[in-house]
Amino acid sequence: MDAVLKVENLTKVFSRKDQDDFTAVDDISFELMPGECLAIIGESGSGKTTAVNMITRLVDPTKGTIELDGEDITAVKGKNLRNVYKKMQMVFQTPADSFDPRCTLGDGISESLRNFGMSKKDARAEAVRLLERCGLGEEFADRYPHQVSGGQCQRAAIARALALKPKVLICDEATSALDVTIQKEVLDLLNELRSAQGDNLSILFICHDISLVQQFCDRVLVMYHGRIVEQGIPDEVIKNPQDPYTQRLIDSVL
């Protein structure tokens, strides 16, 4: 089985005025397999967000390649990104950022569908179906982001990300702004979606909490100072960490 996302030798060096260049991501390589949930963990400044920004083509890499569903997307820009984002979607840490505050949740979800040619009526019906699939009733389609709770807004953001039936869903600290109870509800929802879609949905889970990763992910990559310092099955990494940084991460939460 071929990887749905393949990253090879990915590097990002930022030039800084009157200072030495800064290497935010240093020669990382990994694969995300169909149906897999792969975590990237590390503290703030470890390079995980820069890595995601390159994968989603928000930032150009200095070196390396990114393949999505067998296609090299390393240098894709402009209008051609539409096809990339049809296969890869993102759920952010602050769910309200996913929506225009002047538009209802239903309009926010259906917008991308209309952009790909679906009629307004059909897009509305699909938005309602997606909201219901994510545990929200039809009435939420007419609510604005500020009218719902953080957990409800994050469910709507997941519905929006699923609208185009992406193969890869990137969750960038998607649960860290939520309280523990709501966190669990969102993770349960993501697990349900994974079970329902099987190999058609893979998740890249960006996080700093290794205990969450242990509950939810199949594999974990540990990043420190821009490099992958350890990887493996979460239980094995937690029980037998090989890198001192991984041990410090584990000690901080367990």
Image (cartoon, rainbow, N blue to C red):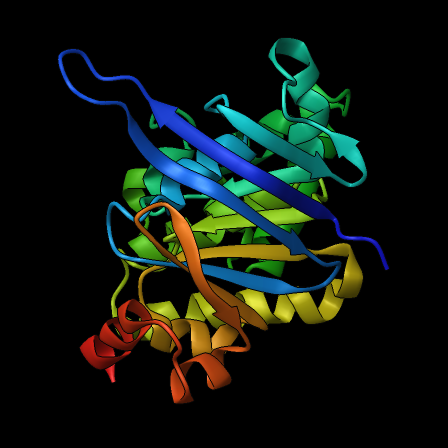
**75 is higher (above) or lower (below) than 230:** above
**68 is higher (above) or lower (below) than 115:** below
Tell me where residue 144 appears, x and y as whole percent: 37, 36
> In the rendered image, which quarter is residue 219 located in?
bottom right
Quadrant that contains the N terminus: bottom right
At a point 68% along the width and 45% down the height, the residue shown is 6
**110 is higher (above) or lower (below) than 182:** above
Tell me where residue 243 appears, x and y as whole percent: 35, 72
Tell me where residue 48 appears, x and y as whole percent: 39, 46
Tell me where residue 138 appears, x and y as whole percent: 55, 51
* Front-lying residue, 77 or 139: 77
At a point 59% along the width and 32% down the height, the residue shown is 64
Residue at the far bottom: name it.
239
* Front-lying residue, 249 or 229: 229
At a point 47% along the width and 34% down the height, the residue shown is 11
At a point 63% along the width and 46% down the height, the residue shown is 162
Q: Is residue 175 left or right of residue 171?
A: left
Quadrant that contains the C terminus: bottom left
**33 is higher (above) or lower (below) than 69:** below
Q: Do we see residue 46 in this rendering?
A: yes
